[in-house]
Each structure stands twice: as structure tokens, then as C-alpha cells.
């Protein structure tokens, strides 16, 4: 289990600055195969599954983690594929919460 996966997301009310590219890249190294957007405002990862049912089950697991953490990703579900995008909407960029949730998703 990574250090990030052991942490808990903290509510963000928009009173902090988003991570810059360098800060994001440091935390990105603790994740498995997540991609940093060109403007460093979000991270994303695509997951593949054998069929729609497995993809849907994964989405439901991600949803349960997101609810428990109080931090919610953008999720796109299609046949055998799930795309997850994380950003902290309140600050229009990345916060530690995004990397914490990504680490927890990686454990699924």
C-alpha cells in the first residue's frame, strides 16, 4: 500500500492554490500509469475489462471509494473500458485529494 493510499481526503473549499506541474509530477510518481494533463489541471487513467459488466462493477467500486472519501472523479464508462479523470473542482486544478483517490483506485 502506498503512503498516498493510507491518507484520507480532506474537504477543499477553494482556499488553497492548485499544485503546479512540478508538485504534481512528484506525487504522480507514486501512482501507477496515471497521466498528467498538459496544463497540469487533472490526472487521468484508462482501465480495460473483458466486458461491460466488469467495467460497471469497477465503476461501482470507484464510486464507493469516492463517496467514502468525499472526493468524486469524472468517470466515463463504455463496453470494456473505464476512463477516470481526477481534479479538484473547487480550485480548478490538482490537490493532494486527487492523488489520494488515484492511489486508492489503483488498489482495486
Image (cartoon, grey):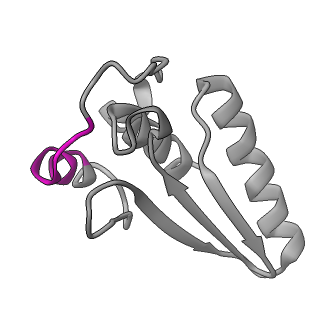
x, y (%) of residue 1? 40, 37
Whether residue 23 appears in magenta in the rendering, the answer is yes
Instruction: Examine the rendering and report whether any part of residue 42 can be seen.
Output: yes
x, y (%) of residue 53? 89, 69
x, y (%) of residue 106? 50, 52
Q: Is residue 18 above or below residue 56?
A: above
Q: Residue furthest right?
A: 53
x, y (%) of residue 60? 80, 49
Going by the image, does 61 lie left or right of 105?
Answer: right
Residue at image coords 64%, 35%: 66
Q: Is residue 11 above or below residue 48?
A: above
**Could you say which is closer to the camera, residue 90 or residue 30?**
90
Going by the image, does 52 lie left or right of 44?
Answer: right
The secondary structure that dominates the magenta segment is helix
Q: In this view, does 39 lie above or below 80?
A: above
Q: What stretch is highlighted in magenta?
A: 18-27
Amino acid at each position: 500500500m502506498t503512503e498516498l493510499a493510507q491518507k484520507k481526503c480532506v474537504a477543499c473549499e477553494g482556499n488553497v492554490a492548485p499544485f503546479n506541474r512540478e508538485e504534481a509530477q512528484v506525487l504522480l510518481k507514486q501512482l501507477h500509469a496515471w497521466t498528467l494533463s498538459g496544463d497540469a489541471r487533472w490526472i487521468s487513467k484508462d482501465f480495460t475489462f473483458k466486458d461491460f459488466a466488469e467495467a460497471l462493477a469497477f465503476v461501482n467500486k470507484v464510486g464507493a471509494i469516492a463517496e467514502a472519501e468525499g472526493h468524486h472523479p469524472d468517470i466515463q464508462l463504455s463496453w470494456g473500458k473505464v476512463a477516470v479523470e481526477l481534479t479538484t473542482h473547487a480550485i480548478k486544478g490538482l490537490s493532494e485529494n486527487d492523488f489520494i483517490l488515484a492511489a486508492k483506485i489503483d488498489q482495486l
